[in-house]
């Protein structure tokens, strides 16, 4: 009888402990850097992201922290985190850039959204960080964009990659401002393009300027660099009621379940053991 009681107690304790062990197994820490100023569409996206990611953190047992202080881009601070997110901008100071480059070269993981890859000569964000734009992202500087923010049909380019597991071959995205880049990523052997704009999207954009409407071409929107634990996602620009000088939000990036699945897949992939395919 005493043995049976001890067995039942042991079983009860095991049942209590098992969920916490499972949670710890998936545990990793994410830090999201953001600026959240100037462009209302980017401010809207950052606010939305900082509401959506904590919900995923609870569901999938990881920690999600945020900072708008880019001076935290230093070795000591970064050592506390397994995944870094750039929600909108990028580090600008040389010491911040060196810290991020070393973090990535020593096994850190990163996911960047939309404006985090922007670089244009004689702008607030000049093309003056060769490692980041030419080697790490591979895209080079900004070329042009569609306007206004519109949905696109996106096509999976690497169906066996774990990040697109469970995604349909094509799907309609949330509205977004889409970027064209200076470099052709298809010519870079280090780059795996995961999603591109499908030709059924054309014409893409509404203008009013003619160059803001795309009628043809190849436009990658999600890719990874095989030399690093990283993913770039072009989405991250909500539609705003610009015409009426209003801050009213007309679309939301995280209102699209297929996109959400991709981002969730990416976080779990970056935060866990990297698998081959």
Image (cartoon, helix red, strand yellow):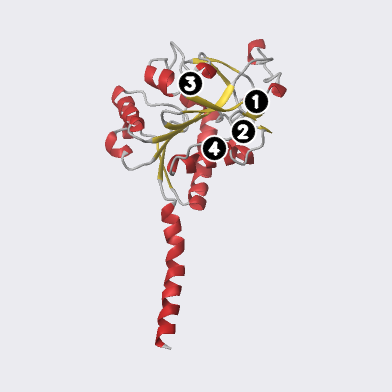
Asked if marks 4 and 2 touch (Cβ < 8 Å), the reply is: no
Q: Which type of secondary structure does the marked residue at label 2 adopt?
A: loop
Mark 4 or mark 2: whose residue is earlier in sequence:
4
Asked if marks 2 and 3 touch (Cβ < 8 Å), the reply is: no
**Circle number at residue 226:** none
Position of 184 with respect to 85 (left or right) is right
Residue at image x 57%, y 26%?
221
Q: Please name the residue that numbered disc 3 is placed on.
A: 189
Q: Which type of secondary structure does the marked residue at label 1 adopt?
A: helix
Residue at image x 36%, y 31%?
104
Q: Residue 250: x percent and y percent?
A: 65, 33
Res. 199 image quadrant: top right
Alpha carbon distance from label 1 to label 2:
9 Å
Asked if marks 1 and 2 touch (Cβ < 8 Å), the reply is: yes
Mark 3 or mark 1: whose residue is earlier in sequence:
3
Alpha carbon distance from label 2 to label 3:
42 Å
Residue at image x 51%, y 13%?
182
Q: Residue 117: x percent and y percent?
A: 47, 23
Q: Please name the residue that numbered disc 4 is placed on.
A: 163
Mark 3 or mark 4: whose residue is earlier in sequence:
4
Q: Please name the residue that numbered disc 2 is placed on.
A: 248
**How many numbered discs?**
4
Which one is in front in this view, the residue at disc 3 or the one at disc 1?
A: 3
Q: Please name the residue that numbered disc 1 is placed on.
A: 244
């Amino acid at each position: 009888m005493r043995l049976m009681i001890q067995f039942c107690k042991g079983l009860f304790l095991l049942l209590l402990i098992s969920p916490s062990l499972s949670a710890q197994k998936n545990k990793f820490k994410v830090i999201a850097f953001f600026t959240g100023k100037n462009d209302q569409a980017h401010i809207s996206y950052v606010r939305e992201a900082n509401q959506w990611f904590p919900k995923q953190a609870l569901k999938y047992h990881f920690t999600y922290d945020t900072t708008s202080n880019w001076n935290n881009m230093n070795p000591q601070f970064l050592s506390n985190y397994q995944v870094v997110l750039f929600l909108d901008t990028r580090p600008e100071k040389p010491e911040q850039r060196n810290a991020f480059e070393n973090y990535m070269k020593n096994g850190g993981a990163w996911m960047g959204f939309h404006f985090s890859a922007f670089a244009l000569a004689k702008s607030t964000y000049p093309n003056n960080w060769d490692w980041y734009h030419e080697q790490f992202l591979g895209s080079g500087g900004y070329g042009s964009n569609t306007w206004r923010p519109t949905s696109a049909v996106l096509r999976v380019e690497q169906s066996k990659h774990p990040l697109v597991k469970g995604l349909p071959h094509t799907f309609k995205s949330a509205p977004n401002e889409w970027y064209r880049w200076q470099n052709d990523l298809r010519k870079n052997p280090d780059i795996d393009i995961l999603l591109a704009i499908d030709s059924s999207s054309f014409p893409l954009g509404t203008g009013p300027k003619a160059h803001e409407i795309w009628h043809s071409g190849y436009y990658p929107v999600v890719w990874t660099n095989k030399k690093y634990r990283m993913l770039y996602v072009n989405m991250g620009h909500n539609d705003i009621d610009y015409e009426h000088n209003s801050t009213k939000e007309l679309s939301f990036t995280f209102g699209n379940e297929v996109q959400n699945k991709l981002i969730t897949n990416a976080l779990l992939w970056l935060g866990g053991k990297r698998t081959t395919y």
